[in-house]
């Protein structure tokens, strides 16, 4: 990994974590819209940015009210989603990977932790998936398309 890629991964990790923490009231729990998740689409743009996204998620999950289990399980959900993006043909399909991964895995995690607050598991999965859809498939696709219009940003992202 070259220096530029290492620096970009560090910046991505820091921005992901900071954005999640700044919006903590909506970033954790059975009903969440983790706006920092739009950044997961950077893995579709350049798979070499996966480490920054995974580290950023792990750092953000250090503040999770669900403790160490969320650091592991939540980060694994993100890893699965961003790793899989290299195998899909377009950005919209890539955006659905975190929707599915987080909806299922985080929903199951919250059920296992007893954090559903009386809500049915399928409903919690749907709420989490909906939050991911808003953050990644709507906001993320728009933001990435806008960012990629800039030659400077494409250069820094390595595309």
Image (cartoon, rainbow, N blue to C red):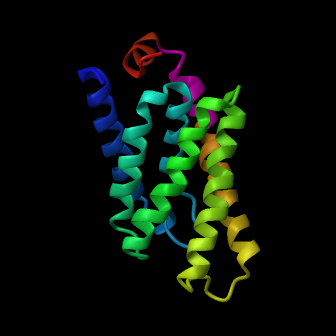
Tell me residue 131's x, y (percent): 64, 58
In the displayed structure image, the side of residue 94 where residue 11 appears, left or right:
left
11 displayed left or right of 130: left
Q: Give the image location of residue 129, x and y in percent.
A: 68, 58
Question: Most extreme residue toward the left, as rendered?
Answer: 3
Compared to residue 2, the image places residue 40 above or below, namely below
Q: Residue at the location (68% across, 72% down)?
A: 124
Image coordinates for residue 151, horizontal then vertical, percent: 45, 10
Q: Could you tell me residue 100's position as x and y percent?
A: 69, 53
| Quadrant of the image occupied by residue 10 | top left
In the rendered view, tell whether residue 136 sits above or below residue 9.
Answer: below
Q: Residue at x 67, y 63 (%)?
A: 104
- Residue closer to the observer: 103 or 80: 80
- Quarter of the image for the N terminus: give it: top left
User: Main structural element of the magenta stretch: helix, strand or loop?
Assistant: helix
Please provide the residue range marked out in magenta. 141-150
Note whether 154 is above or below 134 in the view shown: above
């Amino acid at each position: 990994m070259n220096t530029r890629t290492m620096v970009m991964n560090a910046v991505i990790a820091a921005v992901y974590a900071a954005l999640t923490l700044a919006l903590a009231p909506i970033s954790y729990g059975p009903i969440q819209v983790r706006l920092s998740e739009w950044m997961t689409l950077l893995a579709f743009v350049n798979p070499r940015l996966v480490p920054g996204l995974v580290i950023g998620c792990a750092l953000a999950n250090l503040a999770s009210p669900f403790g160490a289990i969320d650091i592991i399980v939540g980060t694994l959900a993100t890893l699965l989603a961003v790793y899989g993006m290299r195998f899909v043909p377009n950005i919209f399909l890539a955006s659905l990977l975190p929707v599915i991964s987080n909806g299922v895995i985080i929903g199951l995690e919250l059920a296992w932790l007893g954090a559903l607050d009386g809500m049915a598991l399928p409903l919690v999965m749907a709420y989490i998936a909906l939050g991911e859809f808003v953050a990644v498939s709507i906001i993320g696709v728009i933001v990435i398309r806008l960012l990629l219009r800039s030659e400077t940003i494409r250069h820094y992202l390595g595309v």
